Image (spheres, rainbow, N blue to C red):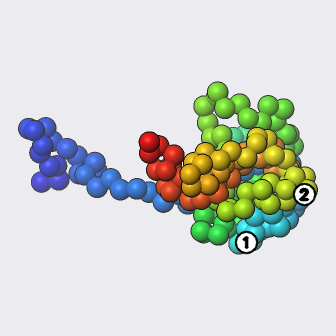
């Protein structure tokens, strides 16, 4: 029998083994792929894995997938694959046709969807300075959100308008310290 019974109600076998999934990669869109690759390598030390590669919605398997995923208006795009220090993939897309455009409102946090990526670096101030000196910008003050431990956060953006949060400490360490009172 594939179903377990709890409180006289069957539970499908597909629901019995839920475990934390691994985040495989994050993807962003930029108007200049070559500049973005250079920036993410120089500022965050991300490693190039593959690319840039041009994709066209042609009759190849990848071309058909690109067309299915992005719809009929996409005529051409380029992609590169990088990796973070903890091996989370970081994909960068440049849409060529239609041409990529920078959003005017790049932090519409009140609308659903992904709002930012977060990087961990113990020296937030130096990283903010590096981001600002290389075409990005610091969006917020540096906040010491767990003062007794010196845990800090700040919001910045890359030169293309993508939002980047920075934690001085790891995610679980920061969140559990933040909510303990």
- The x, y position of residue 169, in whole percent, is 59, 59
Q: Which mark is residue 16?
A: none
Q: What residue lies at 66% left-to-right and 66% top-to-bottom?
A: 84
Q: Is residue 98 above or below residue 125?
A: above
Label 1: which secondary element: strand
Label 2: which secondary element: loop
Residue lying farthest left?
8
**Count of marks, rendered view:** 2
- The x, y position of residue 171, in whole percent, is 54, 55
Q: Nearer the viewer, residue 41 or 126?
A: 126
How many residues crowd mark 2 within 10 Å: few (<14), some (14–19), many (20+)? Answer: few
Q: Which mark is residue 47?
A: 1
Q: What residue lies at 13% left-to-right and 38% top-to-bottom?
A: 9
- The x, y position of residue 93, in whole percent, is 76, 53
Residue lying farthest top?
110
Of discs 2 and 1, which sits in the foreground?
2
How many residues crowd mark 1 within 10 Å: few (<14), some (14–19), many (20+)? Answer: some
Q: What residue lies at 73% left-to-right and 35% top-to-bottom?
A: 107
Q: Which mark is residue 134?
A: 2
Instruction: Name which quarter of the figure residue 51 lies in.
Output: bottom right
Quadrant in which the N terminus appears = bottom left
Quadrant in which the C terminus appears = top left
Alpha-carbon distance for marks 2 and 1?
18 Å
């Amino acid at each position: 029998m594939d179903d377990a019974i709890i409180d006289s109600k069957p539970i499908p076998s597909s629901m019995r083994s839920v475990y934390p999934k691994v985040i495989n990669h994050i993807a962003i869109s930029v108007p200049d792929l070559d500049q973005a690759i250079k920036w993410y390598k120089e500022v965050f030390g991300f490693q190039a894995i593959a690319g840039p590669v041009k994709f066209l919605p042609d009759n190849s398997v990848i071309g058909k997938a690109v067309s299915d995923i992005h719809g009929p208006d996409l005529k051409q795009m380029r992609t590169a694959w990088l990796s973070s220090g903890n091996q989370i993939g970081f994909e960068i897309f440049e849409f060529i046709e239609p041409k990529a455009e920078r959003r005017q409102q790049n932090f519409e946090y009140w609308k659903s969807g992904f709002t930012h990526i977060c990087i961990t670096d113990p020296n937030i101030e130096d990283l903010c300075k590096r981001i600002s000196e290389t075409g990005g910008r610091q969006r917020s003050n540096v906040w010491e959100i767990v003062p007794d431990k010196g845990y800090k956060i700040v919001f910045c953006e890359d030169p293309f308008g993508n939002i980047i949060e920075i934690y001085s400490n790891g995610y679980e360490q920061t969140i559990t310290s933040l909510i303990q009172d």
